[in-house]
Image (cartoon, grey):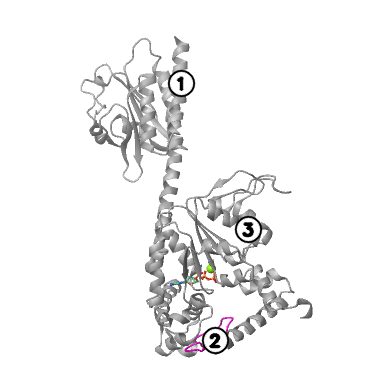
């Protein structure tokens, strides 16, 4: 007899701990726990009350054997009734016969006939914080164990519930925060935050709106600083994949021999030193979007593997033969002329056409000069807020900004404005206040240029860039990674430019 009831208790406790980890739904898990107590231990009308720390009210969050209406009525304040008393004292209470107990308020109205029913009420406590109480009804007959046994079992149930409620609270907080962050990202990367009224830019926005809702591969083309990454994020956060991850990979920043592993991952033991399985970026982007930035820098060997991803939607981790299915939208970007790269054999033609399903070319700032005032206003407002200033710009200065060629495009414009807001001595930016502090010269105007002039301009820009690179190399003892950092570019980009400009280190 004794043994039988012990094993029943154990079974019930195991079942309670199982149902409490079944989901992250508070009400559902707690209701299942109360149902278990009723079905396996004949503890009827089990209720879980949780304390609202703000209102100080105890509310039934889950119950078994009570109607919705009865649950709704079950509210107590600290110190009120038996339930309220238990939360106040932190001690369990046992009422042998609720018909004889004036403190028993029967607020839910669920017991028309109270005689002969005993009532047990146990606090739920986590790290000495009172979270709530559990209560059950019990009709004691001879074959049941004693009250002490019941209090002991309910004490264990209550500590299991406390652990679960503690975890659930952490989960709920993290979940609320994640939802809030996602909402902020969706707002931030939305069409209204893309500045530009020009027809050229408006047609970009039209394309963005159209393709955002699809899973189509998109190739973003445009000079440095024209907004390729911003558009890529907007495409993701305005797409049905917005809840999934956005994983950006800068193909130029990764060393050539690591790119493949970074993208596709590697199995443990795939090469010497691979002591653990590595998850690649494609796998991490599951359900979301992968942004392959500077795709033109991708080595030919990796291009072949990427082509397979696009064609067959599968890949393998390095050192594994098991194909992994890809559920990822691909957005690629480059500031190179990929067709030229195809012609010179540096970029696979088949991959080019696969990526080019939808291509969006972002116009340079000099092609949409009429947008400059809008962008200036937008960034002034933003930096005024950031630096708590209230700076305006003269018409003359605005004209100066409109005439400049902005080889670094919007990034350069934004940096210039930020610097000016920081440096401004009064509330007005005048023409002579403009700090033309880019790696390009302020004299490189591009208004109404012929193509010959444009050529001279790009030669000029290149000459300046070459000189800056040489200086940075000298200043950093020819350590390329340091020089690259000083220039604000990646070591691979620096390597590319050293080759492009034929800079010979040993002759410097
Ligand atoms: N239409 C726009 N409206 C407002 N800000 C913009 C717009 N386009 C780009 N920007 C801003 O300009 C900066 C550069 O944009 P982004 O990094 O997307 O350029 P990119 O084309 O990826 O440049 P790179 O080729 O050098 O990587 C960012 O700060 C971005 O927020
Ligand atoms: Mg970019």
Q: Quadrant of residue 165?
A: top left
- Does 157 sit left or right of 223 as displayed? left
- State the CA–CA distance, disc 3 to disc 1: 56 Å
C-alpha span from label 1 to label 2 = 83 Å
Where are the magenta residues, as a range?
434-450
In the foreground, 478 or 289: 289
* Residue 121 in sight here: no
Identify the mark at residue 302; answer none if there is no mark. 3
Task: Report how far apart the C-alphas of labels 2 and 3 lie in the structure.
Answer: 35 Å
Residue 132 placement (x, y as % from top left): 37, 35
Q: Which mark is residue 469?
A: none
Identify the residue shown where x is 50% and y is 67%.
Answer: 220
Q: Nearer the viewer, residue 321 or 233?
A: 321
Nearer to us: label 3 or label 1: 3
**Magenta part, dominant SS:** loop
Residue holding disc 1: 11
In what element is the residue under mark 2? helix
Q: Earlier in the sequence, mark 2 or mark 3?
A: 3
Label 1 near label 3: C-beta < 8 Å? no
220 shown above or below 244: below
Residue that mark 2 sits on? 454
Residue 271: % across, % down: 71, 49
């Amino acid at each position: 007899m004794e043994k039988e009831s012990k094993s029943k208790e154990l079974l019930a406790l195991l079942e309670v701990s199982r149902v409490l980890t079944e989901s992250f739904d508070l009400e559902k898990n707690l209701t299942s726990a109360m149902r278990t107590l009723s079905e396996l231990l004949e503890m009827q009308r089990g209720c879980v009350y949780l304390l609202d720390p703000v209102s100080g009210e105890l509310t039934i969050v889950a119950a078994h054997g009570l109607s919705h209406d009865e649950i709704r009525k079950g509210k107590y304040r600290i110190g009120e009734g038996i339930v309220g008393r238990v939360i106040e004292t932190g001690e369990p209470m046992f009422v042998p016969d609720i018909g004889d107990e004036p403190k028993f308020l029967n607020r839910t109205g669920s017991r028309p006939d109270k005689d002969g029913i005993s009532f047990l009420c146990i606090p739920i406590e986590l790290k000495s914080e009172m979270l709530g109480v559990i209560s059950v009804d019990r009709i004691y007959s001879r074959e049941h164990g004693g009250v002490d046994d019941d209090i002991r079992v309910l004490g264990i149930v209550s500590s299991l519930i406390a652990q679960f409620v503690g975890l659930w609270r952490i989960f709920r907080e993290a979940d609320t925060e994640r939802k809030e962050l996602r909402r902020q990202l969706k707002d931030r990367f939305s069409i209204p935050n893309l500045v530009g009224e020009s027809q050229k830019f408006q047609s970009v926005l039209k394309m963005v709106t159209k393709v955002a809702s699809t899973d189509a591969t998109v190739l973003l083309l445009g000079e440095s600083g024209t907004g390729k990454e911003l558009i890529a994020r907007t495409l993701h956060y305005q797409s049905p994949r917005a809840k999934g991850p956005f994983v950006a990979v800068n193909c130029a920043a990764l060393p050539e021999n690591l790119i493949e592993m970074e993208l596709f991952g590697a199995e443990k033991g795939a090469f010497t030193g691979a002591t653990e399985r590595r998850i690649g970026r494609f796998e991490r982007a599951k359900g979301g979007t992968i942004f392959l930035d500077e795709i033109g820098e991708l080595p030919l060997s990796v291009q072949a593997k990427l082509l397979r991803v696009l064609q067959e939607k599968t890949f393998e981790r390095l050192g594994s033969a098991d194909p992994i299915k890809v559920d990822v939208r691909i957005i690629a970007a480059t500031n190179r002329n990929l067709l030229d790269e195809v012609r010179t054999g540096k970029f696979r033609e088949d991959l080019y056409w696969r990526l080019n399903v939808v291509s969006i070319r972002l116009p340079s700032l000099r092609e949409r000069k009429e947008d400059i005032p809008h962008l200036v206003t937008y960034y002034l407002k933003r930096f005024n807020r950031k630096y708590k200033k209230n700076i305006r710009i003269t018409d003359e200065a605005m004209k100066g900004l409109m005439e400049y060629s902005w080889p670094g495009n919007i990034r350069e414009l934004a940096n210039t404005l930020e610097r000016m807001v920081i440096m401004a001595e009064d509330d007005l930016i005048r023409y002579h206040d403009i700090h033309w502090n880019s790696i390009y010269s302020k004299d490189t105007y591009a208004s109404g240029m012929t193509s010959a002039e444009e050529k001279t301009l790009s030669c000029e820009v290149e000459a300046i860039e070459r000189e800056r690179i040489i200086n940075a190399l000298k200043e950093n003892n020819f350590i390329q990674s340091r020089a690259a950092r000083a220039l604000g570019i990646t070591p691979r980009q620096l390597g590319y430019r050293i080759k492009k400009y034929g800079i010979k280190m040993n002759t410097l």
